[in-house]
């Protein structure tokens, strides 16, 4: 691997070359789709000759979805929200070890880290502060890009990556409707808790699904239409009581959370300017229409409990409309745990 050398008098170790420079052949101009090249200071399009800044090691490849209507657009509104309220924060994470401990406490992240194939090229779309990207990038035989439209969040993500010298993770500012990557290059594309904050969730899915190579995998996490009703009701109560009843949310009562972490959760769940809700059957239709076969889900829609040994990338039974509805009702009855987010995993057909 090529490195950028630093004189011994100023540094005891050489700095690893940024991931976007080592893998620049998979990047593309968000305006014309042309090849990109970097001189270490800026990124240059070989097609339309546009030039993009590099901020704190992050190439700024964000292109407005519709430049004529950007002001007041949902993308612009949500971008401004997360610039002010990055989620999640790093207040309780100060090392690779603490990030790994936090990530592996959640079964999904642990299984994902264990089951992604060797040598995979991965993209997390809407990575926020990049905790999952950094966690997955700790693996020596894997390359993981995290993209987001919010530069503030990406600076937090890349700052942690640099402090911990996580060489196989990298971050790029990008609008998911105008991807800064070439079609069909990723083994795995993850977008967890993102598409429902866009004005066109299906269009957003179609956009990122084009980045998946044949036989590659896509993972999307969305708010559930039925399970999210509990959150909707609490949001109403908080609004009419000026947030005096915020203790009704279990995260706000968690003694292990500091105030910044509680605030980040509360704003993301109850103060967000835009969200939509979806169903298992709806996303199955997205998969079918865009050339993906269903593999698995969390919570499961096939018989049996979700276990610590679940095979995320193995085909599971997709159930029936009735069994999927039952799963959604179970999410509602448990109080919309974790915001009633459900995860769907699909594999792109080879032809």
Image (spheres, rainbow, N blue to C red):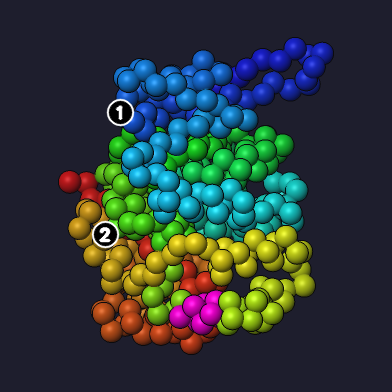
Does residue 195 sit above or below 320 in this rendering?
A: above
Q: Which residue is mark 2?
A: 287
Q: Which residue is mark 1?
A: 32
Q: Residue at x 36, y 33 (%)?
A: 30
Does residue 123 sit above or below 222 in this rendering?
A: above
In the rendered structure, the answer to whether residue 303 lies left or right of residue 19 reads: left
Does residue 321 sit above or below 56 in this rendering?
A: below
Residue placed most toward the observer, 13 or 132? 132
- CA gap, disc 1 and disc 2: 27 Å
* Mark 2, secondary structure of its residue: helix
Residue 54 in the image: state x and y as whole percent: 55, 26
Q: Is residue 217 magenta?
A: no
Residue placed most toward the observer, 239 or 156? 239
The stretch in magenta equals 229-236
In the rendered structure, the answer to whether residue 218 lies left or right of residue 3 reads: left
- Look at the image and tell me whether residue 52 can be seen: yes
Does residue 334 sit above or below 213 in this rendering?
A: below
* Mark 1, secondary structure of its residue: loop
Residue 281 in the image: state x and y as whole percent: 28, 72
Residue 85 in the image: state x and y as whole percent: 62, 54
């Amino acid at each position: 691997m090529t490195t950028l050398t630093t004189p011994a008098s100023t540094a005891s170790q050489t700095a690893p070359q940024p991931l976007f420079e080592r893998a620049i052949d998979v990047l593309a101009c968000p305006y014309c789709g042309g090849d990109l090249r970097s001189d270490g200071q800026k990124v240059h399009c070989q097609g339309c000759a546009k030039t993009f800044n590099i901020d704190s090691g992050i190439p700024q490849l964000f292109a407005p979805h519709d430049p004529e209507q950007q002001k007041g657009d949902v993308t612009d509104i949500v971008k401004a929200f997360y610039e002010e309220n990055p989620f999640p924060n790093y207040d309780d994470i100060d090392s690779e070890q603490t990030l790994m401990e936090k990530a592996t406490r959640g079964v999904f992240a642990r299984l994902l880290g264990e089951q992604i194939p060797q040598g995979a090229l991965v993209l997390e779309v809407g990575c926020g502060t990049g905790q999952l990207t950094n966690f997955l990038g700790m693996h020596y035989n894997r390359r993981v890009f995290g993209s987001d439209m919010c530069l503030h969040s990406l600076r937090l993500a890349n700052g942690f990556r640099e402090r911990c010298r996580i060489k196989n993770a990298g971050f790029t500012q990008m609008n998911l409707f105008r991807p800064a990557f070439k079609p069909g290059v990723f083994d795995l594309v993850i977008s967890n808790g993102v598409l429902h904050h866009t004005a066109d969730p299906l269009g957003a899915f179609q956009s990122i699904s084009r980045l998946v190579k044949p036989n590659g995998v896509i993972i999307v996490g969305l708010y559930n239409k039925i399970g999210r009703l509990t959150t909707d009701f609490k949001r109403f109560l908080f609004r009419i009581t000026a947030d005096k009843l915020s203790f009704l949310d279990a995260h706000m009562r968690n003694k292990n959370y500091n105030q910044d972490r509680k605030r980040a959760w509360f704003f993301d769940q109850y103060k967000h300017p835009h969200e939509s809700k979806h169903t298992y059957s709806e996303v199955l239709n997205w998969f079918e229409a865009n050339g993906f076969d269903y593999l698995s889900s969390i919570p499961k829609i096939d018989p049996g409990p979700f276990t610590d040994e679940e095979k995320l990338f193995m085909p599971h039974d997709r159930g029936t409309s009735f069994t999927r509805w039952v799963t959604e009702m179970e999410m509602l009855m448990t109080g919309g745990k974790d915001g009633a987010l459900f995860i769907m995993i699909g594999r792109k057909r080879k032809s």
